[in-house]
Image (cartoon, rainbow, N blue to C red):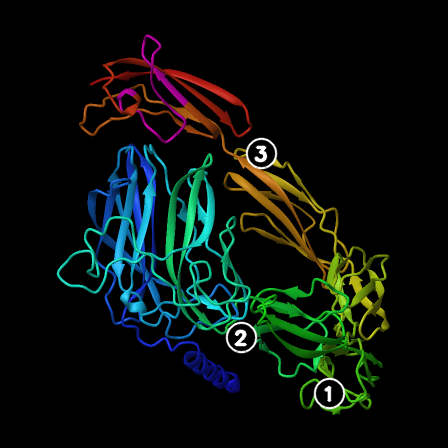
Amino acid sequence: MPNRTMWLRALWAVILIVGGTFPTWAAHLVGGDLTYTCTGNNMYQLKLVVYRDCNSTGAQLDQTASIGIYDGVSGQLLYNLQVNKGATIPLPANTGNPCLQAPPNICTEYANYITIQSLPPRASGYVISYQRCCRNATITNLNNPDDWGMTLTTRIPPNDTCNSSPQWNSTPPIVLCSQEYLNVPVTCTDPDGDSLYYSLCDLYHGGGKGQGGGFNTPQPSPPAPPPYAVIPYKAPNTTTNPIPGNPPLSMNPTTGHLQGKITVLGQYVMAMCVEEWRDGVLLNTIRRDYQFNVTSCQAAIWADIISEVDDPSQLCIGTTVPFQEDSYNTTFFHWDFGDPNLTTDTSNLPNPVYTFNDTGVYVVTLIANPGWPCADTDQVVFHIYPPINAGIQWSGGVCADEQNFAFTPTGFWYPDATIEWTFGQPGDANLASYSGEFPPPITFSQPGAYPVSLYIQSKACEETVFDTIRVYQRPKIDAQLSGIVGCEPYTHLFDPQASASTEMFFLWDFGDGDTSHAAMPSHTYTQAGLYDVKLWMWTDEGCIDTIFVSYPEAVLVNPRPSSTFTVTPPVTSIYTPIVTVDAGGFLFNEQYFFDMGDSTLYTQTDFFAHQYSDTGNFEVQRIAVNQYGCWDTLGVWVRINPVLNIWAPTAFTPNGDGKNEFFRPFVTGFTTYHLVIANRWGQVVYQSDDALEEWNGLLQNQGPECPQDVYSWHLFIVDFGDSPVEYTGTVLLYR
């Protein structure tokens, strides 16, 4: 807003010229106050606050302040305290009114001087004082203002045991607004709950421009004793009317608020006093000496709306708009978003966000500093249009050989709307894109899934929707089932060689009473015969179709030869290892042979005897093939058992000479073996389940050595006939 900026600069130039020029001031004092707090045990915390014009070329805030404590009646100096300065704190150049922008060359800072002093109860009480010179030369309501100093004083009541003075709640604004009714709080809180009375009071002079020490120097140390000289006001200003106004400036005695309307620009100094009363007795008075800058409040602010949208007249329903204030010199804000049906469409945030949930015309209003005399208003008009709610409708066949799609848009739009279509990728359809409401019939080059988009822009609203058009291959079956031949039982894997773009469903009839819904079933024919096969295939989505195929005499199942025979006996011993094989006669058109399991073969023989040369289990197999080339095999097991035999030595000599060092029984023709050897007292010295393990004469073959003696042995075995047998004997261990 360049015009407003230039105007504001011009305004300040007028203010500085007309209302007192606020140059770089030669003196520095702006004011101060002096209070105390009882901390107990006759100890008091003294707090001095000194305000300084930080644009002044005069003295800086003193590093040490002299605070004098006097007898409350005689004025005798009791203490001269040297109190160090605390941190220097800048005072905001606010006016107490957000409408006012303070002139750029007003600068005030202050520092606290705090100390603790023991002050026992005194019949005459105490007077506490501080003095400093000099005031700003630009003060309007004093004659020769830079010749006057400042005295701050307070009193501790006689015989006081622990009273605290009133404490200032805040610092008054350094700038007051002319031509505006003032209600500025200058209030205190009393820690003791005493009654407070507020008034405008006399300014006290203190210090001077003299040299060489004494009360007339800029910083008297100690300060002069009471009483103190009153500074006269420049006519027509008085103590009770220190600043020109209509109504005159006054101080509410109960609330402590400065009230009135100041009519003349300038720089004014005044004193504000607070009396402390208890039970009808005045205990103490504190004062604040303070300088105010009175300036104009004209055109100090403006309201300005920024919305992050390109065109407020073209918005769609549901749009969320971030708002930003670009106001000047504004502290408080009130937004009204213009919905006539709502009372809640407001905000006090500087930068709110609002969603327009209905159509219509909305006048959005921003009030900067609402309720203040200099409040400003800005407005922006928003037009909200209904949504499109676009959709795609289509019709036409979905099978590749019958497709012809007609597309129609749905939704709401104005006659001047922009409508754009796209159909898959370039080359997918007979038309890649189309501008307009109703495109011509669309066909796609081959089966597949194709994205279709619809874009509609109507006024401020726009929307893009998508759909997928699927073109399906027509279902088909390519299987040619014939000439399938096998031997019973015959298992065949049926492949329909079918294809479709969607899920396929099947029903097979195998011609033997069995059916299947599998796509590629495996079926077993248990009996010989000639079988017809039927197949149904269908789809229930996409390109819907049903196909039936019949395959007459598709499967021929031939019989297998019979391979039954007997072997007698099935179990015998090596003493009689002869078995007889009987096939029950020769079958016509069959070829067969016997495999006896010991590498012996017999061809085309129905009845014969065979002798085995070794023990063991042998599978006798008859393998036959008929005129259809069908094979059959049958096996029968024969077992030739060994003969049970046992031999055991009667003595052994485990003496390390390598001869006859071990003992074990030698056994043949058994399946289970367990040997136990005991001494003459029946104690077991060795046992084993391993027929090949030998006793070495040590206890359990590990030691110690068993003594030379006769030992008994017991052998428990099971022969190949599953019969348990027990053998016993003795053996001499000789070393």
Report if the CB atoms under discs 2 and 3 are less than 8 Å apart.
Answer: no
Badge 2 or badge 1: first in the primary sequence: 2
Estimate the spatial distance between the alpha carbons at disc 2 and disc 3, rounded to whole Å.
Answer: 126 Å
Q: Would you call the spot at circle 3 few (<14 residues within 10 Å), some (14-19), or many (20 or more)?
A: some
The quadrant of the picture occupied by the C terminus is top left
Is 187 in front, or is 692? Answer: 187
Query: Which residues are drawn in magenta?
Result: 675-699
Taking the view exactly as shown, the residue that stands out farthest to the top is: 681
Q: Is residue 95 visible?
A: yes
Query: Which mark, by number, is residue 572?
Result: 3
Q: Position of residue 571 (x, y in %)?
A: 60, 35
Badge 2 or badge 3: first in the primary sequence: 2
Estimate the spatial distance between the alpha carbons at disc 1 and disc 3, rounded to whole Å.
Answer: 97 Å
Q: Secondary structure at mark 2?
A: loop
Amino acid tagged 1 = Glu
Query: What residue is shown with label 2?
Result: 301
Query: What residue is shown with label 1?
Result: 420
